[in-house]
Amino acid sequence: MMRTLHAKAMAVLARGAGGERGAATAEYALILALVAIALIASLTSLEGALSDQLSDIVSEITGSG
């Protein structure tokens, strides 16, 4: 997934590499990459806690807890 995102970002950068428009495109690509990295990092760090919460909820619903 990261390879395809990287390839798309590079294609956008290559297409819009002229003048101010190219600079704006590069800035947007960098912002998009940073947002994607932050999202992946936050979801990875929340994975364990979310899994535990869902397990507790399922246990309460099924009465095995």
Image (cartoon, rainbow, N blue to C red):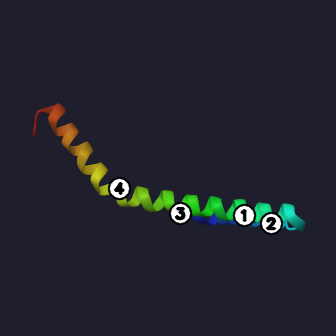
Cβ–Cβ below 8 Å for labels 1 and 2? yes
Residue annotated with mark 3: 37
Query: Tag 2's secondary structure?
Result: helix
**Callout 4, which amino acid?**
Leu
Which residue reaches farthest front? 20
Which of the two discs, 4 and 1, labels the residue nearer the N terminus?
Answer: 1
The answer to which of 7 and 18 lies nearer the viewer is: 18
Q: Earlier in the sequence, mark 3 or mark 2?
A: 2
Report how far apart the C-alphas of labels 1 and 3 lie in the structure.
15 Å
Circle 2 residue: 23
- Amino acid marked by disc 2: Ala
Q: Which residue is mark 1?
A: 27
**Rendering coords of residue 13 (x, y %):** 78, 66
Name the residue carrying label 4: 46
Q: Earlier in the sequence, mark 3 or mark 4?
A: 3
Quadrant of the snapshot with the C terminus: top left
